[in-house]
Image (tube, rainbow, N blue to C red):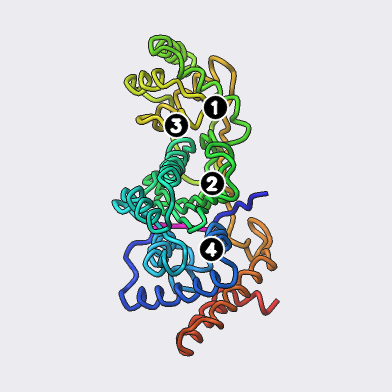
Amino acid sequence: MHRTGVANLPLHYGKAPAWLTVRMRKLAKEIANIMIEEHGTTKFIRRLSDPYWFQALGCVLAYDWHSSGVTTVVTGILKNALSPEEHGIAICGGKGKTSRKTPSDITTVGEKFGFSEQTIKTLTYTSKMTAKVDNTAIQAGYQLYHHAFLVTRDEKWSVIQQGMSNQDHTARRYHWLSDNTTSLVVEPHNAIVGDVKREKALNMTAENSEGARKASVDIAKEPTNKIMRLFEATRPLHQNSLQEWLPEVKADPWQRAVVALNMPRNISWETMKRVYEFQPRNYEELLSVKGVGPATVRGLALVAELIYGEKPSWKDPVKFSFAYGGKDGVPFPVDRRAMDESIQLLQSAVQEAKIGDKEKTRSLQRLRQFVPSTYSN
């Protein structure tokens, strides 16, 4: 059973000052040293793939407790603090242009770990597909701008990536974990976290989108001329039944900025020709084809529903909440046990860390200030 939750991730500007990042790297390294020594690298990346623990780590490292920058800064700090040779784990990729270096990073790390050429190729493909899925198969208005691929010496991997909505200036973070991912296109996430839950979001990774996935593949394998006729056939239906296909969104204080997900105006027929020549066997192979993007996925999903009656899921996979709940029981009561476990784990790590007493005391004080009610109730 996968744990799924959210944390508020509003976009904050600015960057961590140099004096802080130096200390963050030092503290992060010592926490990692202890956890890896005690529990191993597999448990460490499992913790990082838990949005609650990841957010708490960012707080302990003295960064904003709910900023979108937590994602980019914490992964960046860990990338600099962790050594493949010393820790048996490496972080590839990063924010913006750095994310494009992920394939070369994986190759470099793979060679250090002594991976086979096939293993490096598989890890590189996995990195590419996790980004493709979150940018294309799930459409809630977020464009990825950060991609961190974590890999261990024993070939375990995790992904922490983040997208931004230009419409309402919120961010959404996606967590993947190799141990919990049996399929790259069917319920693949360990967690998806964000500030906003959309009333309607196309989710082709949902289990109940299986019919739409299969129909999309079958349609894409048809000759391009036939697909063009299918698209043309749906346009009158689409115009007449747009509100049925995308029901009117009801006002909800917890749900902001409705994302427009209309029938794409243009489909790349060159891409569709490429798909036809490739003849994908399944939805993963369809997504892997170069050029298959959000418009193609959305168009195929529309045809699958209007022509073949195979409806995709329009339920946003994120669940709106706070990391551990709200003090007033909204949107759900505080999960004290989960908070206590995170706090105790981090306290233990800080107390045993090989750092100065002054920094150790400050870290513990920050941790207590984060959730003072846990100990008073």
What distance separates the C-alpha of mark 4 from that of mark 1? 35 Å
What distance separates the C-alpha of mark 2 from that of mark 4? 33 Å
Mark number, residue 41: 4
Instruction: Tell me, yes or no, if residue 141 can be seen here.
Output: no
Mark number, residue 197: 2
Q: Mark 2 near mark 4, Cβ–Cβ under 8 Å? A: no
Please name the residue shown 66% across and 71% down the image: 340
Neighbours of disc 4 within 10 Å: few (<14), some (14-19), many (20+): many
Q: Sequence-wise, which precedes: disc 2 or disc 4?
A: 4
What distance separates the C-alpha of mark 3 from that of mark 1? 10 Å
Instruction: Tell me, yes or no, if residue 269 can be seen here.
Output: yes
Q: Sequence-wise, which precedes: disc 3 or disc 4?
A: 4
Q: Secondary structure of the magenta portion, mostly?
A: loop
SS class, disc 1: helix
Q: Identify the amino acid type marked 1.
A: Arg
Mark number, residue 287: 3
Q: Sequence-wise, which precedes: disc 2 or disc 3?
A: 2
Q: Sequence-wise, which precedes: disc 3 or disc 1?
A: 1
Please name the residue shown 40% across and 49% down the image: 164
- Considering the image in quadrants, where does the C terminus appear? bottom right
Q: Identify the amino acid type marked 2.
A: Lys
Q: Is residue 110 left or right of residue 96?
A: right
Q: Residue furthest left?
A: 97
Q: In this view, does 75 lie to the left or right of 304?
A: left
Circle 1 is placed at which residue position? 213
Name the spot of residue 26 as percent of width and height, x first. 41, 77
Please name the residue shown 54% across and 69% down the image: 36
Q: Sequence-wise, which precedes: disc 4 or disc 1?
A: 4
Residue 40 colored in magenta in the image: no
Q: Identify the amino acid type marked 3.
A: Leu
